[in-house]
Image: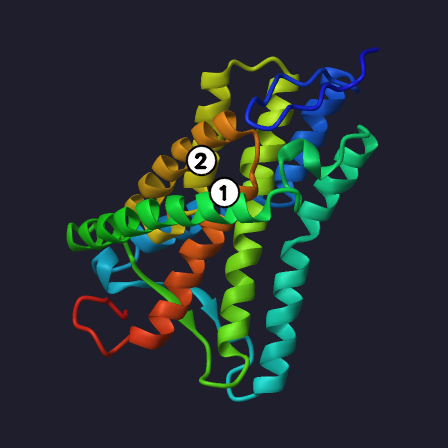
Amino acid sequence: MQAPVQAQAGQPGRPQPLLEERTLRSETLIVLALSLGASGVSAVISFIGSVTRPGALKDQAATLVGSQAPGRPWLDLAWQVFAIATALAPVALVAHLLARERVGMPALGFDLTRPRRDLAWGALVAAVIGGTGLAFYLGARAAGFNLTVVPESLPDVWWRIPVLVASAVQNAVLEEVIVVGYLLRRLDQLKWSPTAALVASAVLRGSYHLYQGIGGMVGNMAMGVVFVLLYRRWGRIGPLVAAHSLIDTVAFVGYALLAGKVGWLPTG
């Protein structure tokens, strides 16, 4: 039985399996079933409900971060913190599974060894993808392929912005750890080709955004392809987490500040 090979930064290699292939397959399916795989199924059901409901898709809204206890701000805050914390449980599971391999999260390039470089590359990626994604969303909605995405509908209280930023970071950590770092590592160990692994990762990312509409799915699949290619090049998900965090933070906080004040931003 061979020990796992840790990918070097910038050159992610094909790690050797520490466990039997059947165990790796089962483990991967369980992790996805507890996280974004289940979200993908939920998004498909939600989309079916949207397209079978009377009215155009653009006249329906998909709210990303909403109030959990309207009119009760402290209870609402408790639910927001609970939701963010529990959403990260699959990441803790992945960390445990990688620790079992004696490699840990650094095997995915998720550590604090290069914070400035990760943030710099992440900011560059966010600037390119964020602007392109916004234009694509507006076009898809105008064409009738997308629901109106409402990034947030929290009450105007002191914890609104901190919760939005925390939600953005949670989304980034969950998605990039599982859909890029963990999934690609396991598919490499299961001897999938790089192309097949890229397609699987991109399709998974697109699937759990289908609740937003066809535009949300296609746009996120394209983002998934770019993120996989960057991960293969850099060997680190750190810049991807930074980029995703910045994209979602700008979307959430920007909507909170601009909704109803500019004409080009749909508000549902």
Residue 63 seen from this side:
no
For mark 2, does the 10 Å Cα neighbourhood hold few (<14), some (14 to 19), or many (20 or more) residues?
many
Q: Position of residue 74 (x, y in %)?
A: 62, 85
Direction from residue 231 to residue 99 in the image, left or right: right
Residue occupied by mark 2:
227
Q: Nearer the viewer, residue 88 or 48?
A: 88
Residue 250: quarter of image: bottom left
Query: Where is 35 relative to 56, above or below?
Result: above
Name the secondary structure under disc 1: helix
Residue at the (51%, 66%) spot, across then down: 165
Q: Are marks 2 and 1 in contact (CB under 8 Å)?
A: yes
Name the secondary structure under disc 2: helix
Residue at the (82%, 32%) spot, across then down: 100
Q: Nearer the viewer, residue 60 or 23?
A: 23
Residue at the (41%, 54%) spot, across then down: 247
Residue at the (35%, 53%) spot, across then down: 212
Query: Where is 179 relative to 161, above or below?
Result: above
Q: Amino acid at mark 1?
A: Leu
Residue occupied by mark 1:
240
Q: Quadrant of the N terminus?
A: top right
Total marks placed:
2
Query: Where is 190 relative to 202, above or below?
Result: above
